[in-house]
Image (cartoon, helix red, strand yellow):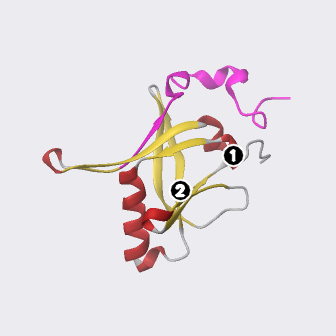
């Protein structure tokens, strides 16, 4: 797959709560040694994309967004594959903890989600350049 985007093309805002949760997990869970945090498109429904988050190894075509947080002595590296990067160029990663409603987890909010509803993929102008029919 051709990689047309660079990590610097992606505007990913990571909230303080997400940074601290990723740091907590990486520093305290030995099973995550050598793994990096990943955001990926997990599926597509009528209302748009769903997103998966977790930890994985670096793939050859991954983009790596790296941000230093010197006040907490932590460098966050977020992996994103080219397909996900194409559709999530302006996104926010947050960590939600709401014990009253029994909700906890990472949440990806994509500023362009409204453009990816229904059968948008039938419009070739909305496909990544490497996916368009030639």
Quadrant of the frame with the C terminus: top right
Q: Which mark is residue 38?
A: 2
Task: Categorize mark 2 by other alpha carbons within 10 Å: few (<14), some (14-19), many (20+).
Answer: some
What's the magenta region? 106-134
- Residue that appears at 44% across and 77% down: 31
Q: Nearer the viewer, residue 18 or 58?
A: 18
Q: Nearer the viewer, residue 56 or 63?
A: 63
Q: In this picture, is 7 found above or below 128? A: below
Residue occupied by mark 1:
8
Which structural element holds mark 2? strand
Residue 58, quarter of picture: bottom right
Q: In this picture, is 12 found above or below 90? A: below
Q: x and y percent of residue 70 in the render?
A: 50, 64
- Residue that appears at 52% across and 38% down: 91
Real-space CA distance between mark 1 and mark 2, rounded to the nearest whole angstrom: 16 Å
Say whether residue 3 is left or right of residue 49: right
């Amino acid at each position: 797959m051709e990689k047309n985007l660079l990590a610097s093309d992606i505007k990913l805002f990571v909230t303080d709560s997400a940074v601290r949760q990723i740091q907590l997990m990486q520093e305290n869970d030995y099973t995550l040694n050598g793994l990096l945090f990943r955001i990926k498109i997990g599926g597509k429904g009528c209302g748009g994309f769903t997103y998966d988050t977790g930890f994985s190894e670096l793939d050859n075509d991954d983009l790596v967004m790296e941000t230093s947080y010197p006040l907490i002595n932590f460098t966050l590296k977020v992996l994103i594959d080219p397909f996900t990067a194409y559709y999530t160029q302006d996104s926010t990663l947050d960590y939600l903890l709401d014990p009253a409603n029994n909700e906890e987890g990472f949440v990806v909010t994509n500023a362009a989600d409204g453009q990816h509803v229904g059968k948008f993929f039938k419009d070739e102008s909305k496909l990544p350049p490497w996916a368009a029919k030639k």
